[in-house]
Image (spheres, helix red, strand yellow):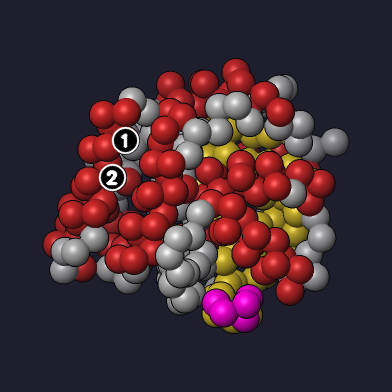
Amino acid sequence: MRAELSRVQIDDLSIGYRRAGRGAPLVLLHGFLCDSRCWLRQLEELSEYFSVIAWDAPGAGSSSDPPDPFTLADWSHCLAKFLDALDVTHAHLVGLSWGGVLAQEFYRLYPRRLLRLVLADTYAGWRGSLTAAAVEQRLVRCERDSHLHPNEFVSRWVPEMFTSSASPGLLAELSAIFADFHPHGFRQMAQSLADTDTTHLLPQIHSRTLVLWGEDDRRSPLSIAEELHHAIPDAELQVIARAGHVSNMERPDAFNTHVRAFCLSA
């Protein structure tokens, strides 16, 4: 049974989320263009071991668009209030892509609230992981494409999120999610990635950390995973074969196995 969408009010923002299972809280943070629907297999399969929570970040899915300006710190404070509203004081945090950068910022602001940290197919911010030229190129593309019709947007963006062997069904599933993207929220999230460099923070992360990566990630190549792995004290690196950027959807069994084993280990 799939976790149904619920809703909570945080300040002036209506936040949608899905929750399933019992146990230690496992909070899932999606990437830009995604929402809680990208975590349906995790909500189903990991709920046997954890209380799995996946939100629609402000500016995505069923949640409200945030005001301008809205920074990663603002998203982090909103996440903290969201967890308070759900009576979650401490949690395992799993962040994918933009969600992984948010998870790092959340650690910076609320380090005592984390049990363990999983950083999946992410960055030390675009500014921390990419060249200045690449950051500018990505930001310009996001601004330009945010004005496209959803059908054209989907055709441009979805294929690069998976490997070339992704099934038509998987492509259709992500296309349905991307078609509902929020242009305003997308631009804000892209700007937050372009503004962020967490390289100074990485050596100060003392929560146990798993760096989890798709072997064939075209948006955030494995070299970035290796940089995070080396910079975070005692971090563990696991690579998922035949997986692209949205590795949790393309290879959910492997992704879930690594997250479960890491978060349940002594």
Q: Residue at the location (45% across, 52% down)?
A: 31
Q: Residue at the location (28% across, 45% down)?
A: 139
Please state which amino acid type lies under the numbered disc 2.
Leu
Q: Are marks 2 and 1 in contact (CB under 8 Å)?
A: yes
| Image coordinates for residue 59, horizontal then vertical, percent | 43, 67
Density class for disc 1 (Cα within 10 Å; few <14, some 14-19, many ≥20) is many
| Image coordinates for residue 153, horizontal then vertical, percent | 19, 60
Q: In the picture provided, is 68 more to the left or to the right than 187?
A: right
Work out whether 11 lies above or below 154.
below
Q: CA distance from mark 2 to mark 1?
A: 6 Å
Q: 80 or 45, which is in the foreground?
A: 80
| Image coordinates for residue 61, horizontal then vertical, percent | 43, 71
Please state which amino acid type lies under the numbered disc 1.
Val
What segment carries the magenta color?
Answer: 9-13
Q: Is residue 163 visible?
A: yes
Name the residue beneath numbered marker 1.
135
Q: Is residue 181 visible?
A: no
Quadrant where the image shows the C terminus: top right
Q: Residue at the location (67% across, 24% down)?
A: 203
Name the residue beneath numbered marker 2.
139
